[in-house]
Image (cartoon, helix red, strand yellow):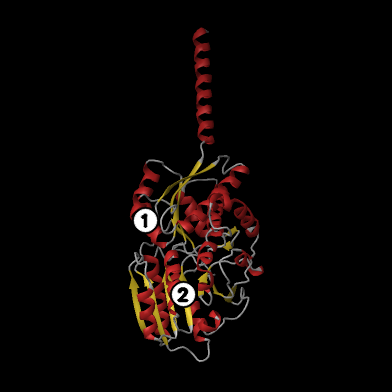
Amino acid sequence: MPNIRRALNGAVAAVILLCGAAAERAAEPITIGFSMELTGAFAVVGKTGLLAFKIWEEQTNAKGGLLGRPVKLVYYDDQSNPSLVPAIYTKLMEVDKVDLLVSSYGTNLVVPAMPVAIQHNRLFFGLFALAANEQFHYPKYFSMLPFGPEPVKTFAEGYFDLALAQNPKPKSLAIVGADAEFQRKATDSARNHAKAAELNIVYDRAYPPTTVDFTPIVRAVGAAQPDLVYLASYPSDTVGFLRAVSEIGLKTNMLGGGLAGLAAAAIKMQLGEAANGVVNIELWEPVETMKFPGVMDFIRTYQAKAPAEGVDPLGYFLPPFAYSELQILGQAIEATKSLDEDTLAQYMHAHPFHTIEGDIAFGPEGEWTEARPIWSQYHDIKGHDVEQFREPKTVTILSPAKYKTGDMIYPFSKARE
């Protein structure tokens, strides 16, 4: 009997230990790892994405987490430097052993992480990365960027649709872009559309990403006398280029393209009147036709937290999409009751998601099945006060028709008056 009693006591103790270990594992957080531009040239945008991620983390945990477990963000500053990205993602996977991976902001920081994620066979979500998967065709990659199944083709398409609808039709074009991953794809898109429209490309140059003085470039563009100017730029370059345009008084009929970060309030506040007349590809504005369920609640939460974080006070550019990205991951986890990344990837390819940026579905390459960029023009900006940007009074959505709020002011000089 004593031996049986001891055996039973031992079995009970083992069960208690196993239950305790299981409970401890269940209480461990689900970790989501990423790098983000918290310093360097892209921090003005990157830090807004981090705040959006933190809002999702806070709200998800307030509702009990996922699968009965809290969620936890694990992140490092990539300093806006693509060369630091591979080592950060290696550390996230091999040292931190995070459950899921998402990316930093932008093509130039996403693409260096792709081979590392692929080598480790991990699901990877790119945030504002233009056609990051076109060379890899990786089935576990997903894109948070609304350019549809042919993102490079779509990227500049609206610019040329608007330009060619003007009277008289433009005949010549200047193309300018930074010599970097995103800008090369953007200018490729412009070049292809220009050739299809039989426009005469009178200037076509890429500048080093380290460029700080854009005066010589703008003078050279002006000397070519183009009807249209297509620019693909970094956030900091956007400011430098448009200030040079104002200083020199560049004459052209239409100026715009892929000016990264221009939709961010911090960039618009820096530029002030130098942004007037620019026609830019953008993703969301707080107009009635784009107030998807939940988005304005998120914006109000973001704006309440932004001052203490020292970030963009409005949050109209990256934040709603960063939040939507984690919404999608959360919905996939809850639907599959799993963290297995093959299971999650299969589910994400097969089902639509309901987010604050509307309903989103993914195609075979991880791109959105439906393209939904908008083309906007800035006008009537006076000074640098943020309040003129809070409601879309200084920006008009030109296309697509379902979101349109007005017509283009043409030519460029008229919008600058």
Question: Can you tell which quarter of the image residue 215 is in?
Answer: bottom left
Which residue is denoted by mark 1 in the rendering?
81
Q: Nearer the viewer, residue 122 or 298?
A: 298
Mark 1 vs 2, N-terminal side = 1
Residue 166, image x, y percentages: 53, 87
Residue 360, image x, y percentages: 56, 62
Left or right relative to 306: residue 37:
left
Q: Nearer the viewer, residue 341 or 304?
A: 304
Q: How many marks?
A: 2
Residue 191 visible in this rendered orientation of the protein: no
Q: Nearer the viewer, residue 310 or 194?
A: 310
Name which residue type carries label 1. Asn
Residue 175 is tagged as none
Left or right relative to 346: residue 200:
left
User: Compared with residue 279, is residue 304 higher up or lower down, i.e. above or below?
Assistant: above
Name the residue: 49% across, 22% down: 14
Name the residue: 64% across, 63% down: 292
User: Compared with residue 167, is residue 393 higher up or lower down, i.e. above or below?
Assistant: above
- In which quadrant will I find the C terminus? bottom right
Which residue is denoted by mark 2 in the rendering?
257
Residue 86, image x, y percentages: 34, 52
Label 1 sits on a secondary structure element that is loop
Count neighbours of disc 2 (C-alpha within 10 A) and say few if under 14, some if 14 to 19, many if 20 or more. Answer: many
Left or right relative to 200: residue 288:
right
Residue 172 visible in this rendered orientation of the protein: yes
Name the residue: 53% across, 63% down: 264
Name which residue type carries label 2. Gly
